[in-house]
Image (cartoon, grey):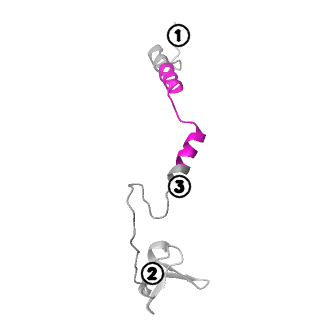
Amino acid sequence: MATDYDELRSDVAESQSTSLQALQSANAPDARSVVRELDEADAFEGNEVPGGEFVAEELVIAVIPQKEDEFTCYSCFLVRHRSQIALEKNGHSYCVECEG
């Protein structure tokens, strides 16, 4: 008697059908309810964060201008020392890491 090795074993087929039935009977949210929940989550007012705390601090950052011996890589936009220029093309400089 020939054996069909491509046919699913009976125990595997049974477990697949029971898991499919379990997924179909699960209470999965529909797309509209998910969008509604996301919209409600985005409706936080002003400085309120999800923990319910109010953030009343300002972020203060000292901006240091680019020096004459530095350049901004046109690929990764990081400020690097001129010694790391690997390529200058069309007036744009590229660093060693981006061109390497």
| Dot 3 or dot 2, earlier in sequence | 3
Give the side of residue 15 with respect to residue 31, left or right. left
Provide the secondary structure element on which disc 3 rests: loop
- Magenta segment, prevailing SS (helix, strand or loop): helix
Using a 10 Å C-alpha cutoff, classify the residue at mark 3 as few (fewer than 14 neighbours), some (14 to 19) or many (20 or more): few
Residue 22 on the magenta segment: yes
Task: Residue 70 in the image: state x and y as whole percent.
Answer: 44, 87
Task: Residue 53 in the image: state x and y as whole percent.
Answer: 37, 59
- In the picture of the structure, the residue carrying the numbered disc 2 is 79
| Dot 3 or dot 1, earlier in sequence | 1
Disc 3 versus disc 2: nearer the observer: 3
x 62%, y 83%: residue:
90
Give the side of residue 100 with respect to residue 90, left or right. left
x 59%, y 40%: residue:
31
Q: CA distance from mark 3 to mark 1?
A: 65 Å
What residue range appears in magenta?
16-38
| Above or below: residue 94 compared with residue 11 | below
Provide the secondary structure element on which disc 1 rests: loop
- In the picture of the structure, the residue carrying the numbered disc 3 is 43
Q: CA distance from mark 1 to mark 2?
A: 70 Å
Disc 1 versus disc 2: nearer the observer: 2
